[in-house]
Amino acid sequence: MESLRPGEARNSGLPYNFRYVFSQLIATFIYWPLARTAKVMEAIGIDVSSFPLSYYRGRSFYTMRTDALDRFGTRLEKRFSKEQIFKMMGEAGLERISFSEGAPFWCAIGYRKRVDVAVAFHTVNVFCGDSRCIAGCA
């Protein structure tokens, strides 16, 4: 089993309200400052591809908050490798599976297999006479 990052193990057992507040504090005092620093550094021409949380430099604070809640507020988080995800999607009947080339990684899309269904058509014969109509299927 993969080890948890600092804070995740202690935070996962807290009641939801505490986990929520904790995650919002992390977003406010860690995610946002690092992301904005990366944005400024990028604007002056510095490569920020390896800067912590640089992915969020063009994202909204809302995105940072929800991602922090996902990371630090989820009781159970199961991580999968790209190969495991590919296998699960294939076993679920998906085809043409592709993964994102950039961050966030392991985002994937797959399509349901097309199934050709023969549709049975019925000819409907309508007989009208006297003021009533009778429909019958042939």
Image (tube, helix red, strand yellow):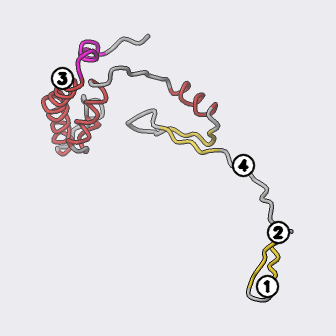
Q: Rounded to the nearest whole Å, what is the CA distance between mark 2 and mark 1?
A: 15 Å
Mark 4 and mark 2: Cα distance apart in space? 27 Å
Residues at circles 2 and 1 in contact by the CB criterion of under 8 Å? no
Element carrying mark 2: strand
Alpha carbons under labels 3 and 1: distance apart? 73 Å
Q: On the rendered structure, is 137 left or right of 105?
A: right
Q: Residues within 10 Å of mark 2 (few under 14, many from 20)?
A: few
Frontmost of labels 4 and 2 is 2
**Can you tell which of label 4 and label 3 is closer to the viewer?**
3
In terms of secondary structure, where does tag 1 sit? Answer: strand
**Mark 4 vs mark 3: which is more N-terminal?**
3
Query: Which residues are drawn in magenta?
Result: 5-15
Q: Give the residue displayed 43% in from the left and 21% down from the top.
A: 78
Q: Residue at x 82, y 68 (%)?
A: 137
Q: Which residue is mark 4?
A: 115
Which quadrant, please, contains the C terminus?
A: bottom right
Q: Secondary structure at mark 4?
A: loop
Quarter that holds the N terminus? top left
Q: Which residue is mark 2?
A: 137
Residue type of the residue flagged with mark 3: Phe
Q: As displayed, is residue 77 above or below residue 106?
A: above
> In the image, which disc is placed on residue 128?
1
- How far from the left and from the top, in percent, is residue 43? 18, 45
Query: Which numbered circle lies on residue 108?
Result: none
